[in-house]
Image: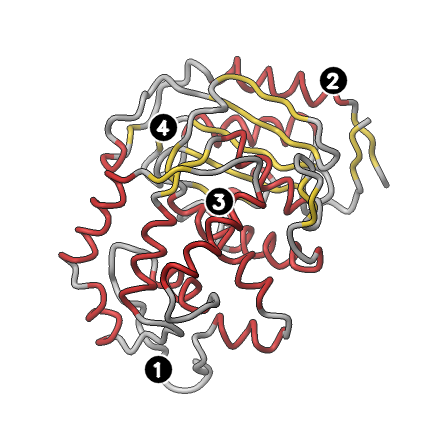
Amino acid sequence: MDRTIKFSELQNAVNEAYEKFKDFDKGEVDPRVKDADASKFGISVTLTDGRTIKVGDTDTQAPLGGIAKVPTAELLLSQLKDPDEIVEKARGGKCCCAGKKPEKPHIPVSPRGVRAMSAIQPTGDADGKWDMVVNNLINLSESEPTLDDSLYKQLTEQNHQANAVNALAEADFFLYDDAAISIDLYTRLKSMKMSASQLSALSATIAADGFNPITKQIVFDGSISQRVVAMMAVKGPHHMSLPWLIKSGLPAQTSFAGTIMGVLPGVMGIAAYSPKVNPAGISARGAHALAYIMNKLGLSALSSARVSVE
């Protein structure tokens, strides 16, 4: 059965979540962002019609980390129109059905994120591909992200120490572009900083089938949204995909820097920021807050009910 909730109910739930967890003091700031202000906490909601709710530190930018998977997937899916080609790219152009499945190489940056980045066009053109990636971030959200140069250098050094390029080659890990270019660009993307406000707009664009409710521009073909949301559900919060989805009903992605971003298709994008993360690398305040809002209002991406906000 379809449901309607009032905007005031959503606003009250967001305010309650903020008040309930603002003094929640568990978790530690990740060493990669050791200078982050541990007191920061903000929750941002962007509805698919453009209405917003912002409480707390929603303009504080933090590195994307694992959230980088979302815009990377959306951009790649936008370039690949053939479903069979999408499956081929996801598998790295190789069938793992027979014989021993190749081991994923152990490198600091996500190998699958690097592969997805390598498949984005144009290939062989680092500057052209990076311009494509940044412009996509701007189009998906409400404003331009910034690069955390210190983190970028730190992560790049870790890649060099791990000899990431050779590690991928030794593992026979298939890429569609030069390994050094792909590793560098995905590392740079993980180091880009966005706020909860920007990320709720980005996720609302996915929830609205490619229509950015803030800028009123069509960013991508709406048929892609369901695939992006499916990826977020399957590859959700680090080491907690299934428990998180059962608990919250919200397909989400997280950053080691303390941001968590979720999509409720057809309804809203939601994001929270607080730099103290639990042992799984998930924002302690942020995860509790988002789950509270979803449960308080009885919302779930897995529900058969269509929800509207009046």
Among the two numbered marks 1 and 4 on one chain, the one whose residue lies closer to the N terminus: 1
- For label 4, the residue is 275
- Contact (Cβ within 8 Å) of mark 2 with mark 1: no
Tag 1 secondary structure: loop
Which residue appears farthest toward the bottom when viewing the image? 98
Among the two numbered marks 4 and 3 on one chain, the one whose residue lies closer to the N terminus: 3
95 w.r.t. 295: above or below:
below
Number of marks in the image?
4
Between circles 2 and 1, the one closer to the viewer is 2
- Contact (Cβ within 8 Å) of mark 1 with mark 4: no
- For label 1, the residue is 100
Disc marking residue 253: 3
Among the two numbered marks 2 and 4 on one chain, the one whose residue lies closer to the N terminus: 2
Which residue appears farthest toward the right when viewing the image? 1
Which amino acid type corresponds to the residue marked 4 in the rendered image?
Answer: Pro
- For label 2, the residue is 8
Question: What separation in Å lies between label 4 and label 3 (alpha carbons)?
Answer: 15 Å
Q: Which quadrant of the structure image shows residue 294?
A: top right
Write the residue at 31% across / 68% down.
104
Among the two numbered marks 2 and 1 on one chain, the one whose residue lies closer to the N terminus: 2
